């Protein structure tokens, strides 16, 4: 059975102290009531070491939100995959639409990042998804397939075991506008069929595909109730322990 996952993406929010407080609150909540899914929190780089240490003996895994497309050296301000790994973090989120759009990350750059992340023992949460314009032109399937082909479909089946896909329609991110569970299920099923074309049905069946975009406690049960939706990648609602726990509880 593939993994069910609820992952938070804090984005550029929380001071170190605020992040530690949130991670502590979540750790206590999930120690008191064990989650029925894997739980990951994605934090800014500066939180990673402290939060990883804090969550060492907990059920919560830690993720970076990015890593460099170069191994090491004179790249001022960048953070490499091996540095992320050395903090104790297990995952890295790559391909987020905010990084593609605001920081001009191309499929080629993302491919480098994916390769370096995996080579350094990180698992990758790889994000794909179409814009509103693309959805209105009914291009969502072509966009998702091209994003996968451009950055992750060169991986071996062995490497693929360390990849989680997150489908995040750009028009639903931070807008309060969620894809309907039917819309999300339709494209998730399509994404799984693309994975099956490359890696076979068995591997596709083991691949976790998360939904992201205005996911909250109120709509998570319906989304997660669909056969091809294996959890969520959560932005805004991961910034408060109660809100995030409400989404985790959708798996109960
Ligand atoms: P929101 O949950 O705030 O819409 O963000 C989704 C997201 O981008 C997670 O990566």
Image (cartoon, rainbow, N blue to C red):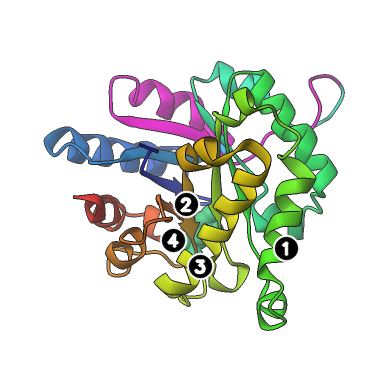
Label 3: few (<14), some (14–19) or many (≥20) C-alpha neighbours in 10 Å: some
Does residue 125 appear left or right of residue 224 in this picture? right
Q: Earlier in the sequence, mark 4 or mark 3?
A: 3
Residue under label 3, please give it.
Answer: 186
- Which residue sits at x=84%, y=29%? 75
Q: Find numbered disc 4 in the image and state the secondary structure of the residue it sits on.
A: helix
Q: Earlier in the sequence, mark 3 or mark 1?
A: 1
Q: Quadrant of residue 104?
A: bottom right
Residue under label 1, please give it.
Answer: 143
Residue under label 4, please give it.
Answer: 236
Looking at the image, residue 211 lies above or below residue 139:
above
Which stretch did the figure color magenta? 45-73
Circles 3 and 1, Cβ within 8 Å, touching? The answer is no
| Picture disc at residue 210 | 2
Residue 52 screen position, x and y as percent: 42, 25
Residue 80 visible in the current orientation: no
Residue 49 within the magenta-colored segment of the rendering: yes
Label 1: few (<14), some (14–19) or many (≥20) C-alpha neighbours in 10 Å: some
Q: Earlier in the sequence, mark 2 or mark 4?
A: 2
Q: Earlier in the sequence, mark 4 or mark 1?
A: 1
Q: Quadrant of residue 93?
A: top right
Residue 122 screen position, x and y as percent: 58, 25
- The residues tagged by marks 4 and 3 sit, at their Cα atoms, a distance apart of 24 Å
Circles 3 and 2, Cβ within 8 Å, touching? The answer is no
- In the picture, which quadrant includes the N terminus? top left
Q: Confirm if mark 4 falls within 8 A of ligand 1.
A: yes
Q: Find numbered disc 2 in the image and state the secondary structure of the residue it sits on.
A: strand
């Amino acid at each position: 059975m593939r993994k069910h996952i609820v992952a938070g993406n804090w984005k550029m929010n929380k001071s170190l102290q605020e992040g530690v407080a949130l991670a502590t609150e979540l750790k206590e909540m999930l120690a008191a009531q064990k989650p029925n899914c894997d739980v990951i929190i994605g934090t800014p780089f500066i939180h990673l070491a402290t939060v990883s240490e804090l969550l060492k003996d907990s059920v919560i895994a830690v993720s970076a939100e990015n890593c460099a497309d170069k191994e090491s050296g004179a790249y001022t301000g960048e953070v490499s995959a091996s540095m992320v790994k050395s903090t104790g973090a297990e995952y890295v989120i790559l391909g987020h639409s905010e990084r593609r759009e605001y920081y001009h990350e191309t499929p080629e750059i993302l491919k480098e990042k994916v390769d370096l992340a995996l080579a350094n023992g990180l698992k990758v949460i790889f994000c794909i998804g179409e814009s509103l314009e693309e959805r209105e032109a009914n291009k969502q399937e072509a966009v998702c397939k091209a994003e996968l082909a451009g950055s992750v479909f060169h991986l071996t089946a062995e490497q693929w075991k360390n990849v989680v896909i997150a489908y995040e329609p750009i028009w639903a991110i931070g807008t309060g506008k969620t894809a309907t569970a039917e819309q999300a299920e339709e494209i998730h099923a399509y994404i799984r069929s693309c994975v099956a074309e490359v890696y076979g049905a068995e591997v596709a069946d083991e691949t976790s595909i998360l939904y992201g975009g205005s996911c909250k406690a109120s709509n998570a049960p319906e989304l997660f109730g669909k056969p091809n939706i294996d959890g969520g990648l959560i932005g805004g609602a991961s910034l408060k322990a109660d809100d995030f726990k409400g989404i985790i509880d959708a798996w109960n």
